[in-house]
Amino acid sequence: SDYMELYRPQIHFSPAKNWMNDPNGMVFLDGTYHLFFQHNPLGNDWGNMSWGHATSSDMIHWEEQPVALKRDELGDIFSGCAVVDKNNTAGFGQNAMVVFYTSAAEFQQQSMAYSLDNGKTFTRYEGNPVIPSSLKDFRDPKVFWHEESGKWVMCLAKGWNYGIEFWGSENLKDWKFLSEFKSPIERCNKGQWECPDLLRMSLDGKERWVLLVSVNPGGPCGGSGTMYFVGDFDGATFSPESLDYPQWIDYGPDNYAGVTWSNTGDRTLLIGWMNNWNYAGATPTSVWRSAMTLPRELKLISYEGRPLLTSTVVDEINGIADGWNDVASGVKMGVDKAYHLRLTLPTTENGSFTLRNNAGEKAEFILNAGAKKLLMRRNASTGNVSFNNTFSIPAIQAPLNTENDFVTFDIYVDSSSIEVFSENGAMAMTAIVFPGSIYDIVDSGNSTDVKVRNLKRIH
Ligand code: FRU
């Protein structure tokens, strides 16, 4: 593939060919970021679930590697994680890359494999499954080392039973049940719970734990979405503080199943699947299907006296950026196939701006000052909106999350996606779009300080 097909992402990871969904097994080891992913090596629809693999030194440029794990006698290889076993707790070898995944067949059980050559080849653990089960909904293991209690902790999602279980182990092989977290609020239980991640973060210098839970359906735009809970974790139990749940890591329709890289020190780095189960199987692309979001750095800040999870595109994006140019309204910007647009709107009055091409395809953005929201309309906006009737949602809506009189938006546009961030990442809104050619014109409305920098294609 030359990655030049219609709609092919130019600055996002997509597999050279065939189907992809969740990011899996993300780990940083010896200067390399690993990204495994739910993959059908044999076709452009969900099926034959395997782990594809890609590597990168900066999370922006990706090199696809051979498929890492294929279906075996225990079932399909569903989502999971990877850790570096620095102290050789499992006895596979110091710094072994140990991966956990769900063996999905009639029941969902947890299995393990390890690599002693930086993810090139894997050996299945002979004692699989490490967590046997007779549950139909029990999946997506995410493991981290909990220093204070000297053990590994695994988070597992319970699908239609709306819960996250925590399990503990000293050697990665023998696991004991610790506790189960249930949402304190019924309205978080509109869809199956999937792909959990528990993050140790700091807020104003104090430790806080953030639990990510992907939910499908029931997301902010219908279909898939990723919620977060903020609280405390004592090594066994997660206790949420009372916030107005659900809180979303992203208000757009197309950021799902995101989890963080393991072994990245103080940085909390997330990538999500840039799609939605409502229409993922119908998106009009070939020879591949789906891309990941841009990689994002997460932080916790205080906003209106409460914790708020922020996300910004990682600084490594600067490595593919040209210099900034001023943008004149209604005139072609002179960008190639992907770009970063920055503009400012007053929050004290209603406003708008539009991204379009000269074929009349457009994405409209409306700032509602009274509701303190940014709305995006992609229903009239894209060349191809008819492939699925849930794609044309009337409006995508996100809170501005600012008290200031002006808000600056950072907008990353690729051939078939738009990712909007308000300043400091206080709001994220990710949406896929399918215009026949990239939106290379901005009608700037009442926005000011409009500038753009070209982003160079990564292939
Ligand atoms: C989330 C998910 C996971 C599962 C995987 C199967 O999108 O449903 O729960 O492990 O996809 O491909």
Image (tube, helix red, strand yellow):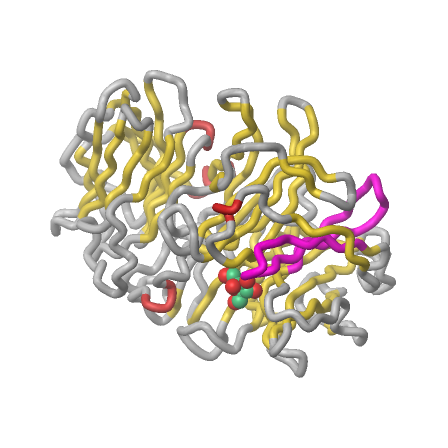
Apparent side of residue 381 relative to residue 212 in the rendered image (left or right):
left
Give the vertical position of 122 relative to 94 (above or below): below
The answer to whether any part of residue 64 appears in the image is no
Mainly helix, strand or loop, the magenta region?
Answer: strand
The furthest residue to the front = 186
Camera-side residue: 443 or 54?
443
Q: Report which quarter residue 3 is drawn in.
A: bottom left
For residue 43, say whether it is visible: yes
> Along the horizontal axis of the image, is 212 left or right of 6?
right
Query: Which percent across, then down, holds residue 201?
Result: 65, 34
Split into 4 quadrants, where in the image is the N terminus?
bottom left
Q: Magenta residues? A: 141-168
Q: Would residue 3 be found to the left or right of residue 108 on screen?
A: left
Residue 307 among magenta residues: no
Q: Position of residue 29 (x, y in %)?
A: 69, 52
- The quadrant where residue 158 appears: bottom right
Task: Report the residue that reaches farthest toward the bottom.
Answer: 73
Asked if the stretch drawn in magenta spans residue 149, the answer is yes
Q: Quadrant of the C terminus?
A: bottom left
Q: Residue at x 73, y 66 (%)?
A: 115
Residue at 36% across, 39% down: 420
Q: Is residue 175 above or below residue 332?
A: below
- Residue at (69% x, 47% y) in the render: 263
Q: Is residue 2 above or below residue 316?
A: below
Q: Residue at 61% across / 57% down in the picture?
A: 157
Give whichever of 254, 452 is nearer the camera.
Answer: 254
- Pinpoint residue 189: horizontal percent, then vertical percent: 51, 51
Residue 291: percent from left, percent from top: 42, 58
